[in-house]
Image (cartoon, rainbow, N blue to C red):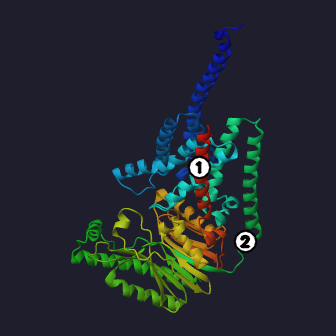
C-alpha cells in the first residue's frame, strides 16, 4: 500500500518543474524586451526601417504576454514613450512642459493594444486569439486619427515605398496595412507558444501567409496592369526666397502681438511686397515655360488684409495673360483681430476670375491654431481641361477623413501647398502620398522647408525637390489629368468599423470563456 506522501511526490516534482520552466521563461522575456527596445528605435519615425515595424511588436508582445498583466503593461508603456521620443524627435511642435504632458497622454494609445491582447487573447482559442492584437491596434489608430494630430505615427506609414503592399490603401485605407503588420506579431507569438509541431498554428501561419501574398500579388497586378494612362499637365510649384527688404525680428514680434507702429507696418508692407513680387515673377517664368498650373508653398505670400485686393489683382492679370491656373497661397494678416491669420489658397482661373478661397481646415494645434481663422472645412473643386482640381493645405493631408472629401468630389489633381521644417522632412510628404492612393487622385505637394513631391494615384513619385538642396526651390511635374474612384473613397473607413465590431465580439467571447472556466 502506497503512502499519501509517496503518491504526491511525482505531482510535486511536476509542479516544481513547471515553476522552474515558468521562471526561466519569464527571465527570457526580459531578453525579448531588450530586442524589442532595439527594434522600436527604428520601427517608426525619422529613422524608420520597414522590417523593424514588423518585428518590434512581435518581441514586445512576447514580453507582455509572459509577465503579470500590470507589470508587462507598465514596462511596455514606459518603453513605448521612450522610443517614441527618439522616433519622432523634433517632430512634435509642443514647447516646454506641454511636450511631456503630451507624451504621458499619448503613451496610453501606444500601449493599449498590448494590454487588450494580454487580457483577452489567453481566453480565446486558436486563430481568433491572434486577431485581438491587430484589431485592437486598428481601432486605437482609427480613434486617434479623429483627434487633433490626425493619423500621425500610424504603423502603416512605416511601409512607405512598398507600392505593391500599399495598393491595399485604395481598399481599406491605412487600417488594412496596420492590420497586416500587427497581425504578423500575434501570429508569430501563437506559433512561438505552441511550437512548430502544432498543426493548427502551422495552418494559421499558412492562412496569414496566403492573405499577405494575395494582397501583395493583387497590388503588384494593379501596378503592372492598370497604370495611369491619361494625358499629363505641366504643374510648376515654387517656394518663397529671401529677398530684401526683410522686416526685423522685433517688427514680426510686434505684428504677432498687434503692437506695430505705423513705421513698422510700412516695414511689413515693404517686405511682403518684395516677396510677393518675386513669387509672381517666378510664376510668370514657369508659365512662359509651359506650365498650365502654377502655385507656391503654404503661406509663402504674406500680405496685409487691406493690401490683399491689389495682390489678387496682380495674380488675376497674370493668370489671364498666360491662360493658366494660378494658386496663390496667402498668409493674410488682419490687424487688431484675436485670430489675425488667414492661411488660404486662392485659385485664379485662366479668365482671371477667382475660382475659390480655401482656408486651411486643420491648423496645427498650438501657436498656429491660436492665430488662424478657419472656415467651413469643406474642400472645393473645379472642372478644368486638365481634370477636376481640388486643394488642401499641409497639415490637412494628415487627416484621412478630411481628404475623403476629395475622393467624394472625384478630384483628379490635388494641390497641397505646405510648409514644414527639417525634422519632418521627408516624413511628412511621404505621409501625404498615402492620401493619393487612398482616394485615387494625383497629388502635387509643394513644401517650403521640406520635400516637395508629386505622386500619381498609385503612389509613384513623379517629381521631387528638396528645399535644403535645391538652388532655385522650384519643382516641375508632369501630372496625369485623370484619377480613379477607389473602393476606399466610396466606402470610407469600413475596415476600421469591422475591426471595432470584431473587437467587441472578442470581448464578449472572452467573457463567456472566463465564465465557463
Task: Measuring from the top left, give residue 102's x and y in whole percent.
Answer: 40, 52
**How many discs appear?**
2
Q: Between marks 1 and 2, how big is the CA–CA gap? A: 45 Å
Please tell me the numbered disc located at residue 227.
2
Q: Image height check: is 130 above or below 296?
A: above
- Quarter occupied by the C terminus: top right
Q: Image height check: is 517 above or below 139?
A: above
Question: What secondary structure is found at the residue carrying circle 2?
Answer: loop
Q: Residue most toward the front?
A: 1
Q: Nearer the viewer, mark 1 or mark 2?
A: 1
- Quarter occupied by the N terminus: top right
Q: Image height check: is 102 above or below 222?
A: above
Disc 1 residue crowd, few under 14, some 14–19, many 20+, Cα 10 Å: few
Asked whether, in this view, residue 464 is left or right of residue 304, the answer is right
Task: Measuring from the top left, give residue 386's x and y in whole percent.
Answer: 62, 84
130 or 370, nearer to the observer:
130
Asked whether, in this view, residue 434 is left or right of residue 278, the answer is right
Please tell me the numbered disc located at residue 92.
none
Residue at the image point whose x is 54% and y is 40% from the top: 37
Query: To which residue does mark 1 refer?
Result: 508
Q: Is residue 468 visible?
A: yes
Amino acid at each position: 500500500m502506497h503512502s499519501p506522501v509517496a503518491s504526491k511526490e511525482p505531482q510535486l516534482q511536476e509542479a516544481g518543474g513547471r515553476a522552474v520552466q515558468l521562471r526561466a521563461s519569464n527571465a527570457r522575456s526580459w531578453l525579448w524586451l531588450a530586442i524589442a527596445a532595439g527594434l522600436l528605435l527604428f520601427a517608426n519615425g525619422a529613422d524608420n526601417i520597414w522590417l523593424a515595424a514588423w518585428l518590434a511588436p512581435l518581441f514586445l508582445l512576447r514580453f507582455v504576454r509572459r509577465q503579470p498583466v500590470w507589470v508587462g503593461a507598465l514596462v511596455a508603456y514606459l518603453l513605448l514613450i521612450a522610443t517614441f521620443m527618439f522616433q519622432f524627435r523634433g517632430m512634435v511642435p509642443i514647447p516646454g512642459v506641454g511636450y511631456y504632458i503630451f507624451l504621458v497622454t499619448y503613451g496610453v494609445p501606444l500601449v493599449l493594444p498590448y494590454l487588450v491582447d494580454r487580457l483577452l487573447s489567453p481566453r480565446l482559442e486558436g486563430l481568433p486569439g491572434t486577431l485581438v492584437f491587430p484589431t485592437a491596434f486598428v481601432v486605437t489608430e482609427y480613434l486617434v486619427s479623429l483627434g487633433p494630430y490626425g493619423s500621425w505615427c500610424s504603423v502603416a506609414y512605416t511601409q512607405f515605398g512598398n507600392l505593391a503592399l500599399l495598393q491595399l490603401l485604395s481598399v481599406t485605407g491605412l487600417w488594412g496595412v496596420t492590420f497586416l503588420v500587427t497581425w504578423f506579431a500575434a501570429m508569430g507569438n501563437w506559433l512561438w507558444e505552441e511550437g512548430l509541431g502544432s498543426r493548427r498554428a502551422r495552418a494559421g501561419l499558412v492562412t496569414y501567409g496566403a492573405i499577405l501574398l494575395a494582397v501583395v500579388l493583387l497590388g503588384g497586378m494593379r501596378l503592372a496592369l492598370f497604370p495611369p494612362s491619361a494625358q499629363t499637365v505641366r504643374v510648376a510649384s515654387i517656394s518663397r526666397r529671401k529677398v530684401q527688404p526683410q522686416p526685423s525680428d522685433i517688427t514680426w514680434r510686434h505684428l504677432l502681438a498687434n503692437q506695430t507702429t505705423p513705421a513698422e507696418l510700412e516695414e511689413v508692407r515693404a517686405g511682403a511686397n518684395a516677396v510677393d513680387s518675386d513669387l509672381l515673377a517666378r510664376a510668370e517664368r514657369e508659365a512662359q515655360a509651359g506650365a498650365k498650373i502654377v502655385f507656391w508653398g503654404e503661406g509663402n505670400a504674406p500680405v496685409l488684409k487691406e493690401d490683399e485686393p491689389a495682390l489678387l489683382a496682380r495674380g488675376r492679370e497674370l493668370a489671364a495673360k498666360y491662360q493658366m491656373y494660378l494658386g496663390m497661397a496667402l498668409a493674410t494678416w488682419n490687424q487688431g483681430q484675436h485670430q489675425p491669420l488667414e492661411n488660404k489658397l486662392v485659385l485664379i482661373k485662366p479668365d482671371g476670375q477667382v475660382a475659390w478661397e480655401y482656408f486651411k481646415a486643420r491648423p496645427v494645434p498650438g501657436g498656429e491654431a491660436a492665430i488662424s481663422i478657419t472656415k467651413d472645412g469643406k474642400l472645393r473643386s473645379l472642372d478644368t481641361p486638365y481634370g477636376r482640381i481640388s486643394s488642401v493645405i499641409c497639415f490637412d493631408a494628415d487627416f484621412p477623413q478630411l481628404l475623403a472629401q476629395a475622393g467624394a468630389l472625384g478630384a483628379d489633381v490635388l494641390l497641397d501647398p505646405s510648409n514644414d521644417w527639417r525634422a519632418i522632412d521627408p516624413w511628412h510628404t511621404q505621409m501625404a502620398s498615402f492620401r493619393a492612393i487612398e482616394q485615387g487622385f494625383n497629388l502635387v505637394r509643394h513644401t517650403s522647408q521640406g520635400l516637395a513631391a508629386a505622386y500619381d494615384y498609385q503612389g509613384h513619385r513623379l517629381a521631387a525637390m528638396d528645399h535644403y538642396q535645391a538652388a532655385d526651390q522650384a519643382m516641375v511635374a508632369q501630372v496625369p489629368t485623370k484619377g480613379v474612384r477607389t473602393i476606399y473613397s466610396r466606402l470610407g473607413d469600413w475596415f476600421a468599423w469591422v475591426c471595432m465590431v470584431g473587437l467587441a465580439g472578442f470581448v464578449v467571447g472572452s467573457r463567456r470563456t472566463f465564465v465557463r472556466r
